[in-house]
Image: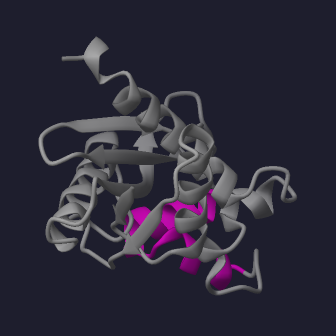
Amino acid sequence: MIISLGTKNPAKIQAVEKIIQMYDTHPIEILAFPVSSGVSEQPKSLKETIDGARNRARLAFESAVGKATLGFGIESGLMEAPYTYTGYLDFTACVIYDGEHYYMGLSSMFEFPKQVVEDILTKGIDSSTSFFNHKMTDQSDIGSKEGIVGVLTNRILTRQAYTEHAIIHAVAQWKNKKLYF
């Protein structure tokens, strides 16, 4: 199976590879394309985040020019959430595109510190840059490593594992597509 992925982020590539191998023991090949999400650098709503993942899935599928079985798009973003300190939670959306249908899954959610959300909303700064600027991490590329969720949970949950949850839900929908169509 050939999978086309709309990112070159190592944490996301490893997450897709791990989950697909859990579902299918056949050899897989992952083609990674740095496609545009078509949304803001840091999406600020459920719809915008899902739109970004859908765009990435479709563009990744198309970038493989007939070679891929599936296109994967993975996008993290904020969504409004009542009773939180900042008014927002971060989550990841995974969308799979097979050339005809889209399949979606979402991760668990967590809240960023207040100053990170303020930077995202008022300065247009992405969460990784904000975390680095506020000295909450010494890694400027934290999103390609354990992620902010890894820092906040003391690596109990890493970006890769967090992303895997969204992928599992999307793959489950794809594997059971006869229940949806």
Residue 99: percent from left, percent from top: 14, 48
Q: Is residue 180 left or right of residue 144?
A: left
In the foreground, 129 or 14: 14
Quarter that holds the N terminus: bottom left
Query: Does 116 lie within the magenta span?
Result: yes
In the foreground, 142 or 127: 142
Task: Name the quadrant containing residue 125.
Answer: bottom left
Q: Is residue 89 left or right of residue 44?
A: right
Q: How many marks?
A: 0
167 in relation to 61, above or below: above
Residue found at x 71% / y 85%: 139
Residue 159 visible? The answer is: yes
Residue found at x 77% / y 86%: 138
Q: Is residue 7 left or right of residue 18?
A: left
Residue found at x 14% / y 71%: 65
Q: How is the image coloured?
A: one colour
176 in relation to 131, above or below: above
Residue 35: percent from left, percent from top: 26, 75
Query: Overall secondary structure of the magenta stretch?
Result: helix
Residue 31: percent from left, percent from top: 38, 73
In the foreground, 43 or 95: 95
Q: Residue furthest front?
A: 26
Residue 109 visible? The answer is: no
88 in relation to 56, above or below: above
Residue found at x 26% / y 42%: 47
Magenta stretch?
114-134
In the foreground, 122 or 45: 45
Quarter that holds the C terminus: top left
Residue 128: percent from left, percent from top: 57, 74
Q: Residue furthest top?
A: 179
Task: Name the quadrant containing residue 146.
Answer: bottom right
Q: Is residue 43 left or right of residue 118?
A: left
